[in-house]
């Protein structure tokens, strides 16, 4: 990849204090980019834990705040935008859809609308999600970019709406240079959403807490490592910057190797030498049923591979040790 490309490029990342945002900012700064971000005072995140925040310009506020967003964009000559900010907790969205829809839907059009007719912006990557597809039955796995959205649950709907709104801003009416990404579940250092499976499992092991399964463990999920995702973000952003014709394209990424939730539990508990506890969790999973969550998801990355030769490099088994150690270090520091 063209590393020199990033030198002094003016970049804005929304949700820079989140899991993906912090990791992306770290990589961009390493490559010499001039990084700004919008934050919501999330002081416990990787951005602070690793001191990344000292090397970027941060604006504290809400992406729903039109005046705030307008001012930031007017003041800077951003060439590249990564829109990652979102309320990402499925459980929170199920309980309180309003707040999630405000951030994830309104937040997206407030942001994008402020870039219309901006002469500096050359590349916008919007984080949609595998959840924007809603539910397809097992025989349709892996999900392809051509599948229409069947989203009905609040978080899924919020991502599907943001996805469509972004495509509208990429249309011939507004001509914003936008690529939309629909990635599988991302995991790795810096993920602090402890309602997500992997952080929840590791946290339970480290703190010697009972892991409370949400379902029977038979759901299929696709897990892709954060370093692979950061690589896709950089790749897509450069490609779009250099070729505006890619605007409006959608790209999936994942491993296309779904695992059952119970398989993930097993791999992590066995890594920590806790086979007995794993069997106990299996017993607790019996007759449990998730509500408001999708059962089968895995992402087909053929399009990314066909266009740019991308495929994931990190196998789940090879990353567990690194991820586990990161949480040990992080959790002992807070
Ligand atoms: N982590 C995953 O598995 C995954 C998978 C597919 C897609 N995504 C998408 O990637 C993006 C980043 O996810 P993440 O895992 O880093 O989540 P995260 O929760 O770690 O980060 C999201 C950030 O957005 C910020 N935010 C939320 N609402 C905001 C608002 N109204 N104004 C300003 N900031 C706001 C939060 O403070 C947080 O720092 C999200 O859009 C998510 O939907 C994530």
Image (cartoon, rainbow, N blue to C red):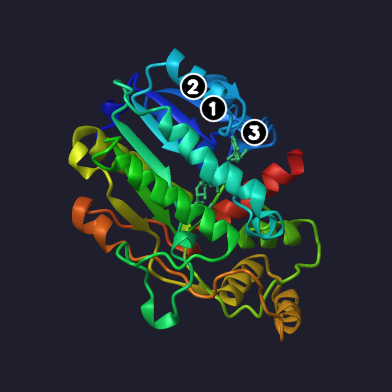
Report whether 168 appears left or right of 334: left
Name the mark on residue 70. Answer: 2
Q: Nearer the viewer, residue 319 or 195?
A: 195
Q: Nearer the viewer, residue 85 or 96?
A: 96
Look at the numbered discs 3 and 1 and tell me whether their residues touch, using CB distance below 8 Å: no
Q: Secondary structure under badge 2? A: helix
- Looking at the image, residue 332 lies above or below residue 257: above
Q: How far is the residue under mark 3 from the one under mark 1?
A: 30 Å
Residue 178: quarter of image: top left
Report whether 199 appears left or right of 129: right
Q: Residue at x 67, y 65 (%)?
A: 272
Q: Nearer the viewer, residue 117 or 219?
A: 117
Label 3, residues with CA under 10 Å away: few <14, some 14-19, many ≥20:
some
Q: Residue furthest toward the bottom?
A: 287
- Which quadrant contains ligand 1? top right
Residue receiving disc 1: 66
Q: How far is the residue under mark 3 from the one under mark 2?
A: 30 Å
Report whether 260 appears left or right of 170: right
Residue receiving disc 3: 49
Q: Residue 92: horizontal and vertical position, in percent? A: 69, 55
């Amino acid at each position: 990849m063209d590393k020199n490309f990033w030198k002094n490029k003016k970049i804005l990342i929304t949700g820079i204090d989140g899991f993906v945002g912090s990791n992306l900012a770290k990589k961009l700064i390493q490559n010499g980019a001039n990084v700004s971000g919008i934050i919501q005072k999330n002081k416990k995140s990787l951005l602070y834990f690793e001191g990344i925040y000292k090397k970027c310009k941060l604006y504290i506020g809400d992406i729903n705040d039109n005046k705030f967003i307008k001012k930031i964009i007017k003041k800077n000559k951003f060439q590249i935008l990564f829109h990652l900010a979102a309320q990402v907790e499925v459980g929170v969205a199920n309980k309180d859809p309003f707040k999630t829809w405000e951030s994830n839907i309104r937040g997206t059009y407030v942001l994008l609308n402020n870039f219309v007719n901006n002469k500096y912006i050359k590349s916008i990557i919007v984080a949609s999600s595998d959840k924007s597809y809603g539910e397809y039955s097992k025989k349709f796995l892996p999900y392809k970019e051509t599948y229409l959205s069947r989203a009905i649950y609040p978080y899924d709907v919020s991502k599907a709406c943001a996805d469509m709104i972004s495509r509208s801003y990429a249309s011939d009416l507004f001509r914003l240079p936008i690529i939309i990404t629909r990635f599988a579940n991302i995991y790795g250092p810096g993920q602090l959403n402890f309602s997500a499976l992997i952080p929840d499992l590791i946290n339970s092991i480290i703190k010697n807490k009972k892991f409370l399964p949400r379902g029977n463990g038979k759901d299929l999920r696709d897990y892709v490592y954060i370093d692979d995702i950061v690589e896709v973000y950089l790749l897509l952003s450069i490609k779009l910057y250099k070729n505006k014709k890619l605007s409006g394209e959608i790209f999936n990424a994942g491993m296309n190797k779904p695992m059952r939730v119970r398989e993930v539990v097993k791999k992590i508990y066995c890594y920590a030498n806790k086979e007995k506890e794993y069997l106990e969790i299996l017993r607790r999973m019996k007759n449990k049923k998730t509500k408001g969550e999708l059962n089968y998801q895995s992402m087909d990355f053929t399009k990314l591979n066909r266009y740019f030769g991308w495929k994931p490099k990190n196998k789940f088994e090879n990353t567990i040790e690194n991820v586990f150690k990161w949480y040990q270090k992080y959790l002992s520091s807070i």
